[in-house]
Amino acid sequence: MERLDGRFIGVYCYLLGCIDSLSRPRGSGPKPSIKQHTEPEQLEFAPSSTSSEVRPECLCVVLSIPDHGCEYTRLSLLSRLMMISASQMCNAVLCVLGRQWVGKLLSRPNGKTHRERTMRHEARKKLAYDWMKPLVAILYWSLLLSIGLFIAGLLYQLRNLSTSFDQGAPILETTWGLGILLAALIVGTIMATTIHGIRFDSSPFEGILSKFVVNILQRFKERWMWIKTWRVSVDWESDQDLFRTYMELIAEVNDPKLLDRVAPSFSYVAWVGYGDGSIELLERVYDRLMASDTSTRVRETVTAQMSRFAEYCREQSGWVGDELGKNDLPEFLFRRYSFPSDFPAWATIVSFQENNRDLRDIGALPAEECVAQLLCTYDQNRQLGDRFEIFDKAVIHCDPLVYRGHEDDVMRILSHVDRLSVARSFMRAPDLHLWSWGYFLPLLVRDYRSEILLHVNEFLQDPPSHVSHQNVSYILNALLSPDFPLPLDIDFSPIIASVSQYPRRDVWTRISSSLVLYLAECEVSQLPDPDIAFVFLRHCIDLQSFLDKNDNTRSRVQRILNTHFLPNITPLPLSRSPSTSPNSAQPAHLAPSSEDLNDSQPHGSFRRRRSSASVIQIG
């Protein structure tokens, strides 16, 4: 190891000696040339082929200098080497001491109590901060200076050494050029980072040089106003940036215990005011707070924000309404409602849509009353907005309760409204799914079957324009049954006409059986319009064969037709057109059309047109 260190120092000092000799005034003799040996201690100068004169200064080597007249050069080289070594040692010592001091600063001092340790630690920080900053600055600049001097000296030596030969030294010159390129890249990187620190107030490359340049530029800001506009500063007082930064920090929290402390600060109101419409950030924060590793208290706190936000929306309806129309917050909340507690909050949010203002008052009610009023929401004689989803959700909420045996809960909900209003709302609402009412509607009409049936019959006498005949059929299916005989003194022609005009495959058997019993008992000829009964009975003949396996209803219908309608039917004479073929079974205008059994209506409904008046005549 000592031998290798000796070789390195020998070569290094030899190069410095060459630099020193080349820097002195040269004589008229030619440049010396070098003959290379295997060992650095044996390096010697070989005279040029053109001259035998050798300068004695160039023969000096620190480890073995044959010429005692080069004592000055040797001392100069040794002094330079010692200065460089001393500076490197000082930097190393300062780095070690600085590392030790920083470790002391970060560690907790000894003490008997937590209070004593905390006070000692704070006192140590106050004392250390005044010294740490200049220490780090000195280390930083001394290291940069040492590195710069070393690189500059190395490049200078390479350049002088490459020009000390009679002939060119391409390897040394290439090495020197590569060193210049690398040094230029380093200087360019330092300049770029310094400019970045000057340009941006929060730049990570901010240092003493960039601060110095900024201070100089700011002294001339009154003269050069473009400096202020050119420099990008951090707006740390912006409420929007503060809220966004806070939400991002919450989304990145890994400690569930920390979420217990920050969960109360989560607010939809603050997001509307300062969130700048970033649904993606809101979803990240919500998913983090509702993650499986969070406590129940955190999740309940976040869930409770729905009702608080709805209350704020009712109080500040003007401003909130404009903000909700600019973002997707209603859709975000829709996927995260908790029912039935969030029915009022949902009604409040939906109330800000067009023609839904009445839902805002419903949203202020308790959950049960809100659900009850939502069931009646379509019972209005005006243009209504889009509210079917919340209406359908209210029906779906009640239906499983009945299925699970919680009829008392549903009855308590219905006690807040008039059941006739609920029935009207059902008939005027958009088409419902069959599975959403299967248990609820029978409970709705129970104990009120006669009143609701008469009201539906009256409602269908002059129905409004927006009536769902599919929902009417569903209500009639819950009202009518063979076990419930219809009163014979009431004209149910409106119901019969509605069933005939808009038959439903899934409820036809039950409804038709009850109405056929009614027609069998009453005097059909006394009805205001017997044609309605005839069309209904013909539907029963045509459709009952494949919808009902029991032929009792079909035979009963046939008897009614034979008794009340067949004697009054007058057949039309056959056409005597010469173009009629003997094989024709009936005239072309009597052939059944494709509309007789049309199954293309929603939910499997089908229609059948009444026969033409030219075919039958009913007296």
Image: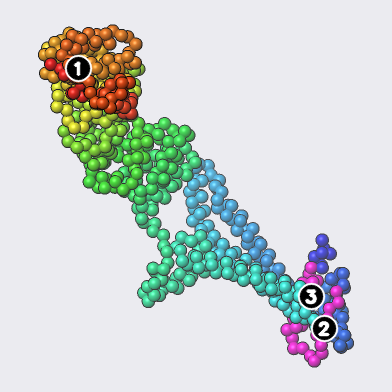
Left or right: where does residue 275 sit relative to residue 588?
A: right
Per the image, is 87 magenta?
A: no
Label 2 vs label 3, nearer the camera: 2
Image quadrant containing the C terminus: top left
Real-space Cα separation, disc 2 to disc 3, in angstroms? 14 Å
Image location (x, y in percent) of residue 263 = 39, 39
Real-space Cα separation, disc 3 to disc 1, in angstroms? 135 Å
In the rendered structure, which disc, 3 or 1, sits on the residue that comes first in sequence? 3
Q: Quadrant of residue 250?
A: top left
Real-space Cα separation, disc 2 to disc 1, in angstroms? 140 Å
Q: Residues within 10 Å of mark 2 (few under 14, many from 20)?
A: many
Left or right: where does residue 567 sit relative to residue 89?
A: left
Image quadrant containing the N terminus: bottom right
Between 95 and 561, the residue placed more toward the observer is: 561
Between 180 and 605, the residue placed more toward the observer is: 605
Report which residue position mark 3 lands on. 14
Under mark 3, the amino acid is: Tyr
Residue drawn at the location 31% of the way across and 48% of the way down: 326
- As helix, strand or loop, the secondary structure at mark 2 comes to loop
Report which residue position mark 1 lands on. 571
Residue drawn at the location 73% of the way across and 84% of the way down: 23
Report which residue position mark 2 lands on. 32
Residue drawn at the location 49% of the way across and 56% of the way down: 126
- As helix, strand or loop, the secondary structure at mark 3 comes to helix
Q: What stretch is highlighted in magenta?
A: 8-36
Residue 569 in the image: above or below residue 111 = above
